[in-house]
């Protein structure tokens, strides 16, 4: 794949992600300060609450990690064209200094890794984790993959594309998905939050818990919790969606200099996840799960 094909792959991804936006490939925009035409790989323009929002996307098809100088140059371009947000995408990743410059600066910029190499075994850009008859349609956020390998601790995990689960856990940048069955005891989201808080207090009496403003869904309660717990690798961020028969929750760990971007990815999952019912058929004495098209 050359850089032109890489750019087109990115363009097609955003066409799907922003169906109601005006998206231009290889756009030109007047610089407010440079007084010259600036080239933008992908320009996304969309009205939100009556305001026109401009997002600039630039793909770096480098064979090495993008450094802080490239990030600073991109921030300067964003200011020149009056963009509200920038997405800088690299196939090989970014240096720590680049992540720090993006996270701690005032400009709204996200650094994303997207590599269209073959996915590893069990990885995909979306999956249906399930427990018993409860399942969920879960899309993976941009630049991440969903790993369908299950353990007693989780039904699925998510992490940056191009990594393995072990690598993601070593870097303290991953999510895992779990369900809480509401039909057993009739528990509500508040019941689950109280139960988990008591477990946190048992593990660390001085732990701190707070709830952040987050996305809202029309028919389901949502919560976004952040917990500081001793001996945890990072802050624990957990997004909850209360469905009729179960509570979906996704737990995330993230380095500080990627937390703003990764919280948005967690919220994307909370916004997009859909409940489904799983029917099991007995075939050759093994249970074969089949997703029922009807959601809760």
Image (spheres, rainbow, N blue to C red):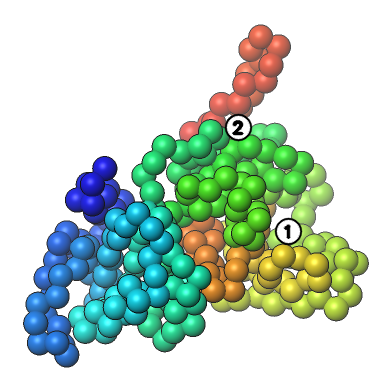
**Dot 1: what SS?**
loop
Q: Is residue 57 visible?
A: yes
Mark 2 nearby-residue class (10 Å; few <14, some 14–19, many ≥20): many
Q: Of label 1 and label 2, which has the lower sequence position?
A: 1
Front position among marks 1 and 2: 2
Q: Residue at x 46, y 67 (%)?
A: 95
Mark 1 nearby-residue class (10 Å; few <14, some 14–19, many ≥20): some
Query: In the depicted view, which residue is nearer to us: 116 or 125?
Result: 116
**Dot 2: what SS?**
strand
The percent position of residue 284, horizontal first and vertical second, equals 66, 9
The percent position of residue 140, horizontal first and vertical second, equals 48, 50
Query: In the depicted view, which residue is nearer to us: 148 or 4?
Result: 4
The percent position of residue 199, horizontal first and vertical second, equals 85, 63
Q: Which residue is drawn at 81% across and 49% down?
A: 185
Residue 199 drawn above or below residue 294: below
Q: In this view, does 148 lie to the left or right of 182?
A: left
Residue labelled with disc 1: 188
Quadrant of the image containing the C terminus: top right
Q: Which residue is drawn at 56% across and 76% down?
A: 213
The quadrant in which residue 201 appears is bottom right
The percent position of residue 84, horizontal first and vertical second, equals 31, 79
Residue labelled with disc 2: 278
Q: Distance between the residues labelled 1 and 2?
A: 22 Å
Total of numbered circles in the picture? Answer: 2
The quadrant in which residue 143 appears is bottom left
Q: Is residue 132 left or right of residue 104?
A: right
**From this viewpoint, which residue is outermost toward the bottom?**
33
**From this viewpoint, which residue is outermost toward the left?**
36
């Amino acid at each position: 794949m050359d850089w032109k094909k890489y750019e087109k792959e990115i363009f097609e991804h955003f066409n799907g992600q922003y169906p109601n936006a005006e998206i231009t490939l290889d756009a030109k925009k007047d610089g407010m300060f440079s007084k010259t035409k600036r080239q933008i790989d992908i320009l996304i323009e969309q009205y939100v609450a009556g305001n026109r929002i401009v997002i600039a996307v630039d793909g770096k098809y480098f064979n090495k990690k993008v450094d802080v100088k490239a990030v600073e140059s991109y921030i300067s371009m964003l200011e020149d064209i009056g963009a509200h947000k920038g997405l800088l995408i690299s196939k090989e990743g970014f240096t720590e200094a680049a992540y720090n410059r993006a996270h701690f600066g005032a400009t709204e910029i996200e650094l994303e890794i997207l590599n269209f190499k073959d996915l590893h075994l069990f990885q995909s850009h979306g999956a249906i984790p399930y427990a018993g008859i409860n399942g969920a349609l879960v899309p993976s956020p941009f630049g991440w993959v969903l790993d369908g390998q299950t353990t007693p601790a989780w039904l699925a995990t998510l992490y940056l594309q191009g990594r393995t689960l072990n690598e993601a856990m070593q870097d303290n940048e991953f999510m895992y998905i779990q369900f809480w069955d509401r039909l057993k005891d009739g528990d509500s989201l508040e019941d689950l939050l109280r139960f988990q808080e008591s477990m946190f207090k048992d593990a660390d009496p001085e732990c701190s818990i707070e709830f952040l403003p987050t996305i809202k869904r029309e028919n389901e309660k949502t919560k976004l919790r952040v917990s500081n717990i001793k001996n945890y690798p990072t802050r624990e961020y957990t997004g909850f969606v209360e469905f009729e028969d179960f509570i979906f929750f996704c737990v995330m760990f993230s380095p500080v200099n990627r937390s703003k971007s990764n919280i948005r990815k967690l919220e994307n999952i909370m916004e997009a996840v859909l409940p489904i019912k799983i029917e099991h058929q007995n075939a050759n004495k093994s249970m074969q799960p089949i997703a029922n098209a009807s959601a809760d």
